[in-house]
Structure formats: C-alpha cells, structure tokens
Image: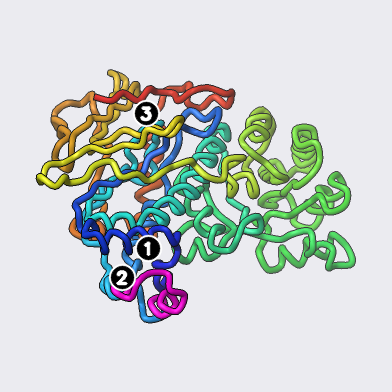
C-alpha cells in the first residue's frame, strides 16, 4: 500500500505539537507506552496483531504537499508548525511484543522513545492499528483453539469496510486461520485464498444439477459444492450424481448444524462418497464451533464474528506518556491516576516466567525510570522468556517484520506461544487472565 498515512490521526495530536513547539517542550525526550489495562470481559488472554502493518504505516507517516496544503487551508495549526510537519520523520526507537504474542493486563506492548512531538504524533495510528487487529486475532485464536485442528477460513470481507477486511484477514491468519476469501489479503500479505460459489450461482441456472456441472467443469471434482440452496438431502444426492464419489467437499450454510451435518455425513457415506469433506459456514463463532466439536465437520468458514472481534471490536489498548526528561536532565516517571484509568509510570521491560514444563505462569514487568533503567535478562535463565524486541531503531524499521514474510513469521511465533499457555486459557467460560501480571 502506498501514500501518506499522516492524516490517519486525530486533530489533537497536531494541536498538542503546535502548543509544544510554541512553549519549547516539543523536543523533550519522552517515553510513550501502548498497553491494555484489562482484557475484554471473559477473555483469558489477548493476541498482539497489527505490528507489521503499523511499521509500514510509520514508514509512510509523512506530510506531503497535499496534506500540508489542506492543514494550512483549514488552519488546523500555525504556519510555523506546518513547516515543522513538512520535515517530520520518526527518528526514535520502538520496542514491542512480537506480533502473534499473547498479552495480559498491563503488558507493555509497545514502547516509543523519541522527542515528545515525534512520539505523540503516532498515538492514533498505533492504537487504531493494534486495537482492531489484536481484537480480530484474539477472537480468531479462540476459534482455532476449539476447532481442534480443523481448518478455518476467514470469510468476513462483506461484514466490514474494504481496508478493515484486508487487515482482519491478515490478523486471523496470524492467529491460526488457514485461509481467507479476500484476494487483496492474499496479494498484499501472502495469506492463502479460497472460494468457490455462492447461492446466486445456483439460482442463476435452471437447475441445481446444471449449476453443479458448470462449477465442476471449470474447477474440477475436487471443488466444494454448496448444497443448501433448496433441499439439502436432494442437494447431496445431486452433487454426488454430477461429480461422482470423488467430490472434494460440500458446504452447508444453514439449518440446525449438528443435526444437518450428521445427516449429510451419513448420506454421503451411503452414496459411496466417503472421502467427500463437509465444510460449515452460517454465522459461526467460537461457541458454535465448540458445539460442533463432536460433529463430523472437516472445516469451517467464519465471517462476521471474526472481523468484529466476536463481540469486542476494539481490544481496549491505550497510549500513554510514562516517562520524560526533567529540566535537570534526569528521567521522571509520569502516570495518569484518574479513577479506573490508572497507569504505571516508567520504562518497562517484560518477560514471561515458565515452569519446568515450559508452561507460562506469570507475566513479569520490571520498572525503571527511562530507557536503560529497567533490568535486562540473563540469557542463561531458561525460566524467563524476554518479550520486548526492537522494532524500529533510530527511525529504521526492522524489515524482518514487514510484508508477507513478516506475516508468516508472526503466524509461526503465535503457534509457539499458544503451546506455552496453560490449558485453562482455552476455556470459553468467563474468567480472569490465565496468568497474573506482576510488577517489580
């Protein structure tokens, strides 16, 4: 994706910069942090997603002549600030949890070290990216865990806006979904794509048999036929008559799914199509997938629920100034203390404590005053897994985390992280975070 990302932001970021430039505090060395005070109700862990997208957005956070002209015409900030924005480049450092990582309340997901004006400019774009993508990935991870190894395809493009659809497909893939119906996600991020036919294709033809035959003629017998446009029992019979017993799969998109799936499996087997798989769609979420765990389903397709975070479309992350240089040159920890919105000041370092079975037992957050003020970890201590990695150093992005390769890396990391979580993490019943967060 090309073009400036600079106006994907809130006006108050620019008006704060305007005032800070006027009073001389714009360059004051600062440390910002993105974190979640709590998990969405009932969730036991969250999944970090959006990091690779965010790094690209930071690279493109430039004010071109078009953005500057609009800001000047609207008188958003003073002319001297327009001049400052013309030269804006993020030149600081960003550390963060790796994409695909699990997180918990208080986890320091992203730390931004820069002058105040440079750092505060990124607040909205950091939160809009991480909140949406992490919400999708967290919901997708729950669905994957109850699918018991059966693949899930993301099919939610028609349930969100066009750019959000691409981001959601990517986030779901990182969290373990097998494929997406969204072609742009395939092109841009390397997510495997899939898709066959909708009910309209069957309705286009004079008979269901003609529709099935047309699809098979172009896609081969390994395709998936949608069998519930009319009568499901007849649809199964017609599908096998047209494709033969080597038919790849049938898709069911309606009905009392446990009952229908069992009947379709029995009918397919009776017709000799024992190798034909069954895929199920129809407004699925983690709870309906779990309810189908004992049914002869081979794969799932999920749309609305995954792209909307299964009831939590935002992950609840915030972006706060946690430390700044004082007039004496020393670091000062700062924190918000409003009721129900307390934050913890200072630079953080974080590690996950693992027991002898490599199961996560605690999120450890170590506090310091500023960059370099929190302890580093002994690389020989196998009970602690460090969580923060450098993402941007002196304005230069670590390109390992970008593009399709970065997306695959995040997916691999997520799979490894899920192996560490206690089994209680995967229960769907309401509960608290599966491991505690401890500050030291």
Q: Which residue is mark 3?
A: 420
Q: Which residue is mark 2?
A: 81
Residue 423: in magenta span: no
- The answer to which quarter of the image holds residue 110 is top left
Query: Viewed as shown, does residue 370 lie left or right of 49?
Result: left
Quadrant location, the N terminus: bottom left
Few, some or many residues within 10 Å of mark 3 (<14, 14–19, 20+): some
Query: Viewed as shown, does residue 159 lie left or right of 184?
Result: right
Query: Viewed as shown, does residue 434 lie left or right of 58?
Result: right
The numbered mark, 1 or 3, whose residue comes first in the sequence reads 1
Q: Is residue 209 above or below residue 432?
A: below
Q: Which mark is residue 14?
A: 1
Q: Majority secondary structure of the magenta segment?
A: helix
| Element class at badge 1 | helix
Towards the viewer: 36 or 265: 36
Q: Which residues are magenta?
A: 67-82
Q: Are marks 2 and 1 in contact (CB under 8 Å)?
A: yes
The numbered mark, 2 or 1, whose residue comes first in the sequence reads 1
The numbered mark, 3 or 2, whose residue comes first in the sequence reads 2
Q: Are marks 3 and 2 in contact (CB under 8 Å)?
A: no
Few, some or many residues within 10 Å of mark 2 (<14, 14–19, 20+): some
Residue 23 percent location from the top left of the image: 24, 59
Few, some or many residues within 10 Å of mark 1 (<14, 14–19, 20+): many
Who's the residue at 35% across and 72% down the image? 78
Q: Is residue 133 shown to the viewer in this render?
A: yes
């Amino acid at each position: 994706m090309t073009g400036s990302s600079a106006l994907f932001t809130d006006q108050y970021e620019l008006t704060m910069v305007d005032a800070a430039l006027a009073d001389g505090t714009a360059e004051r060395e600062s440390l910002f942090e993105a974190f979640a005070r709590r998990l969405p109700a009932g969730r036991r862990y969250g999944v970090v997603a959006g990091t690779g997208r965010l790094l690209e957005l930071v690279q493109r956070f430039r004010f071109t002549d078009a953005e500057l002209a609009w800001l000047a015409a609207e008188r958003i900030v003073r002319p001297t600030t327009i001049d400052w924005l013309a030269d804006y480049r993020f030149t600081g450092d960003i550390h963060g949890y790796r994409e695909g990582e699990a997180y918990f309340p208080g986890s320091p997901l992203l730390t931004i070290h820069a002058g105040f004006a440079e750092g505060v400019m990124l607040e909205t774009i950091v939160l809009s990216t991480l909140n949406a993508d992490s919400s999708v990935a967290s919901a997708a991870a729950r669905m994957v865990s109850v699918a018991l190894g059966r693949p899930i395809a993301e099919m939610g493009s028609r349930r969100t806006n066009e750019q959000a659809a691409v981001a959601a497909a990517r986030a779901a893939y990182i969290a373990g979904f097998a494929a997406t119906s969204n072609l742009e996600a395939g092109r841009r991020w390397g997510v495997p794509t899939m898709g066959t036919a909708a009910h309209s294709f069957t309705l286009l033809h004079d008979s269901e048999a003609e529709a099935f035959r047309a699809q098979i003629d172009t896609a081969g017998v390994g395709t998936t036929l949608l069998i519930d446009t009319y009568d499901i029992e007849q649809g199964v019979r017609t599908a096998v008559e047209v494709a033969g017993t080597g038919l790849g799969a049938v898709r069911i998109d309606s009905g009392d799914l446990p009952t229908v799936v069992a009947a379709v499996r029995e009918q397919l087997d009776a017709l000799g199509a024992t190798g034909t798989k069954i895929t199920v769609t129809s407004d699925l979420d983690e709870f309906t997938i779990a309810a189908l765990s004992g049914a002869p389903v081979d794969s799932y397709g999920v749309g609305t629920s995954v792209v909307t975070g299964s009831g939590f479309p935002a992950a609840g992350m915030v972006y706060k100034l946690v430390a700044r240089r004082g007039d004496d040159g020393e670091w000062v920890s700062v924190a918000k203390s409003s009721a129900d919105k307390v934050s913890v000041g200072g630079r953080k370092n974080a590690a996950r404590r693992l027991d002898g079975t490599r199961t996560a037992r605690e999120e450890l957050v170590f506090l310091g005053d500023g960059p370099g003020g929190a302890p580093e970890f002994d690389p020989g201590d196998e009970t602690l897994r460090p969580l923060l990695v450098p993402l941007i150093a002196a304005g230069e992005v670590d390109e390992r985390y970008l593009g399709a390769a970065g997306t695959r890396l995040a997916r691999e990391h997520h799979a490894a992280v899920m192996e560490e979580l206690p089994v209680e993490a995967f229960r769907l019943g309401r509960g608290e975070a599966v491991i505690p967060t401890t500050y030291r």
